Amino acid sequence: MTSPAVHFALDRHVGTITLDRPANRNSMTPELLDAFAAAVAAARSARELRCLIITGTGACFSAGADFKSTVVRDDGPARAPHEQSFAMYQPFLSVLDLEVPVIGALNGHAVGGGFGLALCCDLRVGARGARYGANFARLGLHPGMAITYLLPRLVGVARAAELLFTGRLIDGDEAARIGLLSSVHDPGEVLPAAQAIATAIAGNAPLAVRETKRSLYRGLGWDPRSAAYLEAFAQAESLTTSDAAEGIAALLGKRDPVFTGR
């Protein structure tokens, strides 16, 4: 546990970060952002971690900015407005830098900056009755949290344009249909569904999974041959690991592999 506002727990190779301010819908207060940054740092330093889940408590995953209070810090040097906004994004955006796969277990509504946090995860499972989206246009605001970058890469430019220009929120079934969610569940089954995926990921060779994640994102802006060259390099490197020897031996021996991350 890193803070009352956000908890980090590690169960064998699966870590869980939980936003725990249900009374204010897990919104982006300075307290929660500081606690989230500490939780991500704890996850990054956990040597046994192979997969991370991010979830929330209550009816919301995160409602984004808390407009009843300020999320702009006044305890440091004066900064331009855009610098203040960019600094505010950093705790959630730090998820993008994690080497292990990250699953968003969207227990409830994910709106605005909370939707941005969901998009920072590698994959997401969600709740059937929840609402998801970026309602910035309805508030007279421009999207933040890298949403204009991440959303079209998941659902396509035209679909992202419709969602961002209208500020429309969508339910879990539609989110799954357009590719935002890998699966949709009753609220009480969201975290168990994420845990099942995380357990499957954590059972694989961790070095291979990390390199696969790295290649997956590097390759988004590349042509197929450049991506194949990167894959060839990474695959050759993975063949030198103990995990690769174990995986092949287990296949030939018709048994389950035991991966050590070496």
Image: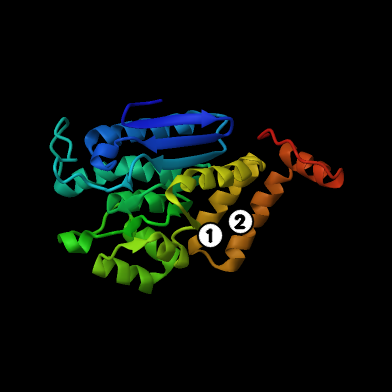
Q: Residue furthest bottom?
A: 158
Name the one closer to the observer, 121 or 125. Answer: 125
Secondary structure under badge 2? Answer: helix
Q: Is residue 241 shown to the viewer in this render?
A: no
Percent of width and height locating residue 121: 44, 49
Q: Quadrant of the C terminus?
A: top right
Query: Viewed as shown, does residue 25 lie left or right of 176?
Result: left
Classify residue 224 by image quadrant: bottom right
Q: Nearer the viewer, residue 129 or 5?
A: 129
Location of residue 224 with respect to 48 vertically, above or below:
below
Q: Nearer the viewer, residue 79 or 5?
A: 5
- Residue appearing at x 68%, y 45% in the figure: 237
Residue 179 lies left or right of residue 224; in this view the side is left
Q: Which mark is residue 219?
A: 1
Q: Which residue is mark 2?
A: 230
Question: Whole-Å distance between the Cαs marked 1 and 2?
Answer: 8 Å
What's under tag 2, amino acid-wise? Leu
Answer with left or right where residue 99 lies relative to residue 211. Answer: left
Q: Residue at x 67, y 41 (%)?
A: 205
User: Residue 36: x percent and y percent?
Assistant: 34, 35
Please give the label number shown on residue 209.
none
